[in-house]
Each structure stands twice: as structure tokens, then as C-alpha cells.
């Protein structure tokens, strides 16, 4: 997103003349340099987005008459979504999923790991970091298979460990399973981000805090946190957006049983391909996009206020 | 001010783009009908692909093995004699039927996909409406060429319906099947039940299940329910039960709504899964059907409502996905009873449902004539017989059936006892949506909702899918 040196809107843009052209390229060449990037963004970002909005106002379907001759239905898909109990359910589950696994789970676990590993011996630290990273870089399908085996009712590892034979974790507690799974899966990013953020905390301040007898919690709150506030917000923004759009829950539960773990991305998939309602699912995709933008705006606003 | 004007300029630009796009969607399907059906008819080098939801060593392994090892080499050989160099590829798949359908529909909507592919009979309507498949006479071009094929005479009318829509043939059907109650004779003996068990009402199923419940670690009865299994829930669950109450899913042009018969079926589900006679968790698992197969093969399920596919491809001792070495002695089968004697559809005592698939030609194939030749070759008496490889199956061809079914008592039972009393699903484009609503209703009941609540949301879903005036209720 920072590739193109777009002209800054506001006063400086009004100043005309050669002073603007710092690099001395001239308009034609400058456009030439920008064109490849803009074309790529246009073809793979802007066009699909507009296409989605367009499909969202039609009754286009995967099969049947509406696949050949869809008609424009205006905002009917959006009013349908607002009254759709299953969409409300999906939204609520997504909020739970983001709160539980990203905002609380990955953030706290990631920070705790970064904080405790800070002083650990390099060998220990590298081993822990390696293991956590492994959870992050393994392909989703492999990970999903492992976790299904872990939670399985009949021969699952978890049941063997706890001695709770016959508990169908993915059926009885689908959301809890998904939250635990996603915390495990995504903690690496928060851990790495916080590790580097913690290096920005001046050791002298930590030392002083120790000298005046601050407790661990007080040190964290009054010395460490003010330094990494920006990092916390950035990290929370990124992981909550990733989590809200994450599709791997589908690999574990397919949204089931009976829609009990159907987060919005999974719901979109089920509506689009299982139900064949491409028009309706595009409308919901657009709503998800708007929700993402709102969350991003909120964080940016917070970030600006803090700094 | 500046900000607003920029925003509104953006909005104008956006809506202009959206308007420009109008009409781009879907219309692309119209042009393909104009293609020359004799394109590449004289080509000396031909490439064809066969797509099917079967894979060697996995789902419907025998079918995939036959296609790859027998059908393709034989066809290549026959074409070589005519001086044509044909390469035929097999594009196997081993996924759930719903997933296979999605993949196929997405490929076809982009004018891609295999030249010949198998599809379930109930998809024919919606695929035809979408233009993904065309009547064989359109694709091949010459109506006489299609209608004069001598194979049609061997395929019974009811079976031909599996590949037809609106009175036109879209594909050649590939045989049919029937549903029965399979039971484990070993468990029945332990529970003191007869080896030639034949229940005459739903109550007799429940009482047998009560007896089986006393055996430790055994699930007495499993009747497919829930959304995870997709169409399997309808075919091996709701629909056979529904015809057992005397109702059919579509009669006199109206879809079944929230009627006493529907509630009776849902109540039966409640009886089974609410009282520990069946395992409700299994019905909610993502891989529940495969698990039910494995548990039956491991002597952990007493009674299972399944199609003869279960006998041929699941517990089959050599190639099945859940092999049972002692299948012939350990697995019993009985007709599905109506809720009470005489209460079934058409006043029958026993009921069943049948389905099947068809093989269709991709309208966008490069070689329509050669694809039709392959389709005929595939459905010739010689190849259909060879596909059985000594095993028995209810094929599409009467001549082959009379020859092979005598050798397998179970399939002979289906052909002589089940097919005369069976029902087929309506070949209407709305059917898959209605079926999905039925599956949801069973999911609700098995998940703990009351029958009335489940039936009410079912009614709403059917009305949304078919239109309010096309739904019956009382």
C-alpha cells in the first residue's frame, strides 16, 4: 500500500510548477512507473470488488434458470441478510471467534511468550519460537487434519489424555474448539511482533522500576505498556481482521453441527456453493467488507488519538 | 464541501461501472447452442476426458478401476481400428456428492470441465436450466443419430427418467438402486431377534431397537439425518419414511409442506434419537456417513437404512470402503415398512426410494461426435457387463440384468421385491432446495428442537424456495 507516492491531498497539491516534480521524471514517465502497480491493483483488487458489488444486486445462482439469465433485484439481497437469522448467527459467532481467539487468545498468549522468553536462554528461546512458528507456517489442511484427530470422539488424542472417551468435542463444544485451535494457530505473529516491540523498551527504565520496587504488574502497566501501545493496537487490528476473514474453521467443522460454528466466511461459502445462491452470498461478502473497514477505521482512530 | 463532492463523484463512478457490467453475467451461456455439432468430426487425433465421482482405492473404486483399466483401453483399441488416434483421460474424484456437484457446476459455468461426466439424476433439471448440459440431440446435432441408438430399448422408461428433463434426454442413465433396512445378524442373535427379521411397522423397528439397546457398546439403529450428509439424509432417511406415511414430496404440482405426515416422520426421528436408540452425535458430525459405515462394519450398529450401494461398495468383502469379510452371512436385509401396514404410498405395506445417475456430454466439448460414440460404447451390453467384473449390480440394461442378478441374492431381492414398490424423486429443478429444507428439519429435531418448531421453519423454507401457492399444508 505504500508503493505509490500518491499526491498528498490538501494544500500542497495546489502549488503548481516544477517544484512538485522532485525526482525530475516528468508526468509521462511518472505515470509509466506507476502504471504496472495500478494495473495489478485494478485487475486483482478493484475489479473483483466492483464485480462482487454487482453480483450482490442480482439473483445470480450457480445452477438453474438464474445461472443463465439473472435479473437485477436491487437491494433485496441486503434486506434479506438483515432479516436472516442464520446471518445474525454467523455475525455473532464471528464476534465470539475474534474476541476469544484473536483479541484475547493470541494477544495475551503472544505477549506472555514474548515477555517470558525475553530472559530465557537462547537455546530455550529458539526452541519455543521454532515450535510456535511451526504452528503458524504449516499448511491449513495438514493442521486441520491433526486437530480433527486430536478432537475425535472415538480415538482422539484429547479423549485419551483426559480419559473422557466418547466426548465429541467438535460437536458438543464447536466454538470453544475453534477458539483454542485458532489461538494455537496464530499466536506466532503476536509473539514475534511483541518480541521486537519489547526491545524498544529502554532497559534503564526497567532497571529504575526495579530499583523503586515496582511489582511485575506495575512494571508492565507503567513502564512497558506505554512504549508498546502502538504495537498492541496494530497487532490487534491485524489479527482481528485476519481472524474475522479466516476460513480454516470450515476445515474442522464445516460450520456444523447445525450452523453452531458457522462464522461469516463459512456462511458465505455455504450459501454460495452449498446453496448455489451466488447473488446473496456476494451481498453478504460486501457486508463483511464494510464491517472490516469499520473495524479498521476504529483502530486507526484509536491509534491516532494515542500518539 | 470538497469532501462531499469527491464522495459523490466516487459514487457516480461506482454506480456507472456497476451499470456497465449489467448484462455481462450469465448471458455468455446463450451462444454455445450455435456451435457446429460436427466440429472436428473427422479429426484423426482426438482427446476426451471422462469425469466421475469415483477413484481407484477410494470412493466407488470398482467403477474407477473399470473405466481406467477396461473401458478406456478397449475404446482406444476400437478407434484405432478405424484409424483414429484417441487419447481418453479419466478425471476421478473421491469427494462427497455435494462437493463434486459444486466443482462440476463451477467448471461447466466457465465452459470447462470433462467432455463426458456423470451426474446425479436430480441435478439434471437445474444443470439443464443453467445450460450446463443440453439435450443429446442438440449436442450431437443429428436427432436420428441419438434416438436410433439400440441401447434405449434396453433401458426401462423409469430409469431413462434419471437422465431426462422436460421430456428430453440429456444423458444416458447408469442403472438404479433401491433402499432397504440392513441389519447385523450377529447382533440380532445376541439380542434374541430372528435372522430373517422383517418389520411390518415403524413400531416393530423401535421394539427391535429396544432389544438391541441392551447390548453394550451397540447403537441399535441409525437413520440418516442432518445437513452434513446432504442428499444421503433425504434418500436414506426422510423420503423413505415419508412414503411410509402415504405422502410424496411432490403431488399434484404442490410440494409437501408442514403436514401431519411430515410431523409424523419428524416424530419418528425424535423417538429414535431422543431416546438413545440412535446416536444423534453421529448425524451431526462432518464425516458422519463414513463413520456410520465403519461402525456397522465393526459390529457396532444394529440396523442401518441404506441403499444397495452399501452392499456392493461399502461392506463388500474385497473392494468395499468398510469391508466385512463375513458380509454374506452377517448382513441381513429387510424391506422398509410403512408406518403401519397399508399406510404407505398407494396403500402399500412396504416402501422404498430409488435414484441413480446419468452420463452427459459437455456441450462445449471439442469432439461432440466422438463423445457420443464413447457414450454409446460405455453403455453397450458388452461394456456394461464387463463393468460388473463378476459382481452384480442393477444396471440400466434389462438384457444385462436378467443375466447377472440371479447370481447375487441381495441384488436380486432389490430387483424383484424393491423396484416394484419403489418411488423416484421428482425431476424438477426446485427439488434440491426442498431436499435441503427437509435435511434442515431433521437436523433441527436431532439437535433437540421440537417437532412443531422444526416443521414450521421447514414450511417457511419451502415457501421461499417454491413460492407460497405451490406448497401444501394443513
Image: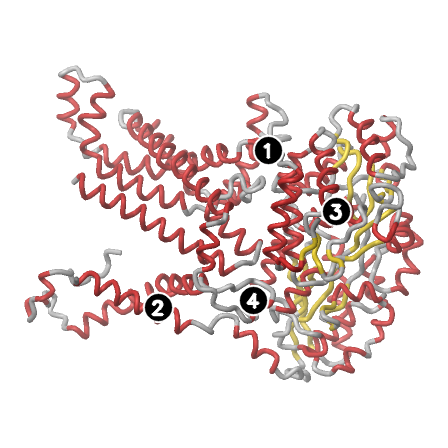
The reply to the same-chain question for discs 1 and 4 is yes
Q: Rate crowding at label 2 as few (under 14), some (14 to 19) or many (20 or more) other CA atoms within 10 Å.
A: some
Q: In which quadrant is the N terminus of chain A drawn?
A: bottom left
Label 1 element class: loop
Q: At 36% across and 45% down in the image, what residue appears?
A: A241
Q: CA distance from mark 4 to mark 3?
A: 30 Å
The residue pinned by badge 2 equals B15
Q: CA distance from mark 4 to mark 2?
A: 23 Å
- Dot 3 or dot 2: first in sequence order is 2
* Relative image position of residue B444 (x, y in whole percent): 62, 40
The residue pinned by badge 4 equals A66
Q: CA distance from mark 3 to mark 1?
A: 25 Å
Q: CA distance from mark 2 to mark 1?
A: 50 Å
The residue pinned by badge 1 equals A152
Label 3 element class: helix
Q: In which quadrant is the C terminus of chain A drawn?
A: top left
Q: Rate crowding at label 1 as few (under 14), some (14 to 19) or many (20 or more) other CA atoms within 10 Å.
A: many
Q: Tell me if residue B391 can be seen.
A: no
The residue pinned by badge 3 equals B236
Amino acid at each position: 500500500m505504500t508503493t505509490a507516492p500518491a499526491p498528498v491531498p490538501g494544500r500542497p497539491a495546489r502549488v503548481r510548477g516544477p517544484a512538485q516534480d522532485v525526482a525530475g521524471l516528468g508526468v509521462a514517465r511518472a505515470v509509466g512507473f506507476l502504471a504496472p502497480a495500478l494495473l495489478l491493483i485494478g485487475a486483482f483488487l478493484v475489479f473483483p470488488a466492483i464485480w462482487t458489488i454487482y453480483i450482490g444486486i442480482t439473483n445470480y445462482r450457480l445452477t438453474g434458470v438464474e445461472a443463465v439469465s439473472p435479473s437485477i433485484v436491487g437491494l433485496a439481497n441486503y434486506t434479506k441478510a438483515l432479516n436472516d437469522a442464520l446471518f445474525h448467527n454467523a455475525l455473532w459467532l464471528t464476534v465470539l471467534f475474534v474476541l476469544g481467539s484473536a483479541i484475547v487468545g493470541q494477544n495475551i498468549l503472544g505477549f506472555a511468550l514474548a515477555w517470558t522468553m525475553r530472559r530465557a536462554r537462547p537455546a530455550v528461546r529458539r526452541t519455543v519460537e521454532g515450535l510456535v512458528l511451526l504452528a503458524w507456517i504449516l499448511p491449513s489442511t495438514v493442521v486441520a487434519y491433526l486437530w480433527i484427530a486430536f478432537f475425535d470422539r472415538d480415538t482422539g488424542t484429547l479423549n485419551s489424555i483426559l480419559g473422557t472417551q466418547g466426548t465429541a468435542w467438535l460437536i458438543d463444544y464447536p466454538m470453544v474448539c475453534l477458539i483454542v485451535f485458532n489461538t494455537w494457530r496464530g499466536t506466532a505473529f503476536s509473539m514475534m511482533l511483541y518480541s521486537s516491540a519489547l526491545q524498544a523498551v529502554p532497559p534503564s527504565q526497567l532497571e529504575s522500576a526495579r530499583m523503586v520496587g515496582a511489582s511485575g504488574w506495575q512494571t508492565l502497566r507503567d513502564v512497558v505498556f506505554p512504549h508498546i501501545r502502538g504495537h498492541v493496537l496494530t497487532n490487534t487490528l491485524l489479527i482481528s481482521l485476519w481472524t474475522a476473514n479466516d476460513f480454516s474453521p470450515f476445515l474442522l467443522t464445516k460450520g456444523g453441527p447445525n450452523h453452531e460454528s458457522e462464522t461469516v466466511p463459512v456462511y458465505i461459502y455455504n450459501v454460495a456453493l452449498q446453496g448455489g445462491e451466488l447473488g446473496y452470498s456476494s451481498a453478504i461478502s460486501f457486508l463483511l467488507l464494510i464491517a472490516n473497514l469499520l473495524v479498521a477505521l476504529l483502530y486507526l482512530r484509536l491509534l491516532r488519538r494515542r500518539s | 464541501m470538497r469532501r462531499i463532492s469527491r464522495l459523490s463523484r466516487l459514487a457516480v463512478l461506482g454506480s456507472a461501472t456497476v451499470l456497465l457490467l449489467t448484462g455481462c453475467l450469465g448471458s455468455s451461456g446463450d451462444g454455445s447452442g450455435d456451435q457446429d455439432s460436427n466440429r472436428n468430426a473427422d479429426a484423426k487425433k482426438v482427446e476426451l476426458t471422462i469425469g466421475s465421482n469415483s477413484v481407484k482405492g477410494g470412493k466407488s473404486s470398482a467403477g474407477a478401476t473399470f473405466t481406467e483399466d477396461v473401458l478406456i483401453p478397449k475404446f482406444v483399441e476400437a478407434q484405432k481400428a478405424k484409424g483414429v488416434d484417441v487419447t481418453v483421460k479419466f478425471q476421478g474424484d473421491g469427494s462427497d456428492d455435494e462437493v463434486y456437484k459444486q466443482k462440476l457446476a463451477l467448471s461447466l459455468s466457465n465452459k470447462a470441465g470433462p467432455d463426458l461426466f456423470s451426474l446425479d439424476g436430480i441435478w439434471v433439471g437445474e444443470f439443464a436450466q443453467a445450460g450446463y448440459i443440453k439435450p443429446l440431440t442438440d449436442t450431437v446435432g443429428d436427432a436420428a443419430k441419438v434416438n436410433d441408438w439400440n441401447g434405449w430399448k434396453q433401458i426401462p422408461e423409469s430409469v431413462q427418467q434419471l437422465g431426462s428433463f422436460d421430456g428430453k434426454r440429456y444423458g444416458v442413465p447408469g442403472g438404479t438402486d433401491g433402499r432397504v433396512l440392513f441389519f447385523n445378524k450377529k447382533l440380532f442373535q445376541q439380542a434374541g431377534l430372528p435372522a430373517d427379521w422383517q418389520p411390518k411397522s415403524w413400531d416393530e423397528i423401535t421394539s427391535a431397537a429396544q432389544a438391541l439397546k441392551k447390548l453394550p457398546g451397540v447403537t441399535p439403529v441409525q437413520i440418516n439425518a442432518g445437513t452434513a450428509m446432504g442428499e444421503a439424509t433425504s434418500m436414506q432417511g426422510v423420503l423413505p419414511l415419508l412414503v411410509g406415511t402415504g405422502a410424496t414430496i411432490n403431488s399434484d404440482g404442490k410440494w409437501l409442506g408442514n403436514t401431519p405426515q411430515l410431523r409424523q416422520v419428524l416424530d419418528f426421528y425424535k423417538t429414535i434419537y431422543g431416546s438413545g436408540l440412535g446416536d444423534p452425535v453421529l448425524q451431526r458430525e462432518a464425516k458422519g456417513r463414513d463413520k456410520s459405515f465403519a461402525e456397522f462394519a465393526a459390529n457396532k450398529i444394529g440396523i442401518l437404512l441404506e441403499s444397495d450401494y452399501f452392499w456392493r461398495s461399502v461392506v463388500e468383502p474385497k473392494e468395499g470402503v468398510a469391508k466385512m469379510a463375513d458380509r454374506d452371512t452377517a448382513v441381513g436385509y429387510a424391506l422398509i415398512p410403512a408406518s403401519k401396514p397399508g399406510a404407505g404410498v398407494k396403500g402399500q405395506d412396504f416402501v422404498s426410494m430409488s435414484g441413480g445417475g446419468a452420463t452427459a456430454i459437455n456441450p462445449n466439448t471439442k469432439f461432440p461426435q466422438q463423445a457420443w460414440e464413447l457414450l454409446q460404447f460405455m453403455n453397450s451390453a458388452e461394456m456394461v457387463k464387463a463393468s460388473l467384473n463378476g459382481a452384480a449390480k442393477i444396471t440400466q440394461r434389462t438384457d444385462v440384468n436378467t443375466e447377472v442378478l440371479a447370481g447375487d441374492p441381495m441384488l436380486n431381492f432389490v430387483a424383484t421385491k424393491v423396484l416394484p414398490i419403489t418411488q423416484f424423486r421428482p425431476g424438477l429443478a426446485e427439488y434440491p432446495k426442498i431436499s435441503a429444507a427437509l435435511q434442515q428439519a431433521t437436523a433441527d429435531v436431532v439437535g433437540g428442537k421440537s417437532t412443531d418448531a422444526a416443521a414450521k421453519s421447514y414450511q417457511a423454507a419451502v415457501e421461499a424456495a417454491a413460492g407460497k401457492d405451490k406448497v401444501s399444508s394443513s
